[in-house]
Amino acid sequence: MPDPDFIFPDWPAPAGVRAAVTTRGGGVSGGPFASFNLASHVGDDPAAVAANRARLRAALGLPAEPLWLAQVHGAEVARFAGGGEPPRADAAVATAPGEVCVVMVADCLPVIFATRDGGAVGVAHAGWRGLAAGVLERTLGALDRPAGEVMAWLGPCIGPRAFEVGEEVRQAFVGADPAAARRFAPNPRGRWWADLAGLARDSLAAAGVTNIHDGGGCTYEDPARFFSYRRDGVTGRFAALVWRS
């Protein structure tokens, strides 16, 4: 069985900050979840998910089990606490070594954060609802550093040639900031192509983050490497992780 396939951010993170994004290769799941699905809520065999999570920990040498979230497309940010149910949140931050933050995605944008001094890290699950609700701004606030001391890396997500939305989505952004109109392009069906990563970049810049790095890659257009809910409906989830060693 091949080893899991990872994307490692190309960004100037300080020493001791580790980050990775999984892809769909190198796991044990079958069918629409083939093969490295890490989500327990999508209908996959629980034993396969558990095996994939064990492979994740081993392949990356994780210092602890990640803080798996119950994601709801909102703007809540979780902090580490011992035991209990997965927190209902779409972002997580950590300040102690060995705490592994993670979000799962399959078209939505994963955004990984680190402070310039390496003292705090975080990750956010940024779909359009989360972006409009301020999940990136809330994550920045939870890092408790001036925005100018934070760097961000934007991972693979559904691209602007594939993310079709209605007028209500466009208005959720343009109504709050008319300049967001540049992130939407009309399509032949009377709807809009939306640039999710561009909207996130604008939100970060408006919050004062200037150190922004783009990992690129369209999940919808790359079925060999990425799960995509928009493309497949029933599918797995890949993960974005960050921690301090």
Image: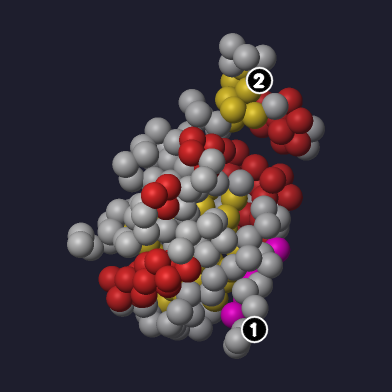
Q: Quadrant of residue 169?
A: top right
Image position of 17 with respect to 108: above or below: below
Residue 81 lies left or right of residue 2; in this view the side is: right
Q: Residues within 10 Å of mark 1 (few under 14, many from 20)?
A: few
Q: Quadrant of the C terminus?
A: bottom left
Closer to the camera: disc 2 or disc 1?
1
Tell me which numbered mark, 2 or 1, is placed earlier along the sequence.
Answer: 1
Question: Looking at the picture, how far across and down is residue 138, in whole percent?
Answer: 68, 60
**Magenta stretch: includes residue 227:** no
Q: Residue furthest left?
A: 1
Residue found 48% across the figure and 75% down from its top: 66
Residue 45 lies left or right of residue 36; in this view the side is: right
Three-letter code for the amino acid on which mark 2 is drawn:
Arg
Q: Quadrant of the N terminus?
A: bottom left
Residue found 42% across the figure and 47% down from its top: 32
Image position of 207 with respect to 140: above or below: above
Q: Nearer the viewer, residue 121 or 188?
A: 188
Residue 84 got which mark? 1
Start-end of magenta stretch: 76-80
Q: Nearer the viewer, residue 183 or 165?
A: 165
Q: Residue furthest top?
A: 188
**Magenta stretch: includes residue 79:** yes
Q: Are marks 2 and 1 in contact (CB under 8 Å)?
A: no
Question: Looking at the picture, how far across and down is residue 225, in whole percent?
Answer: 33, 45
- Provide the secondary structure element on which disc 2 rests: loop
Question: Looking at the picture, how far across and down is residue 184, in whole percent?
Answer: 61, 25
Q: Residues within 10 Å of mark 2 (few under 14, many from 20)?
A: some
Mark 2, residue position? 191
Exactly how many numbered labels are in the figure?
A: 2
Question: Looking at the picture, how far across and down is residue 160, in whole percent?
Answer: 51, 29
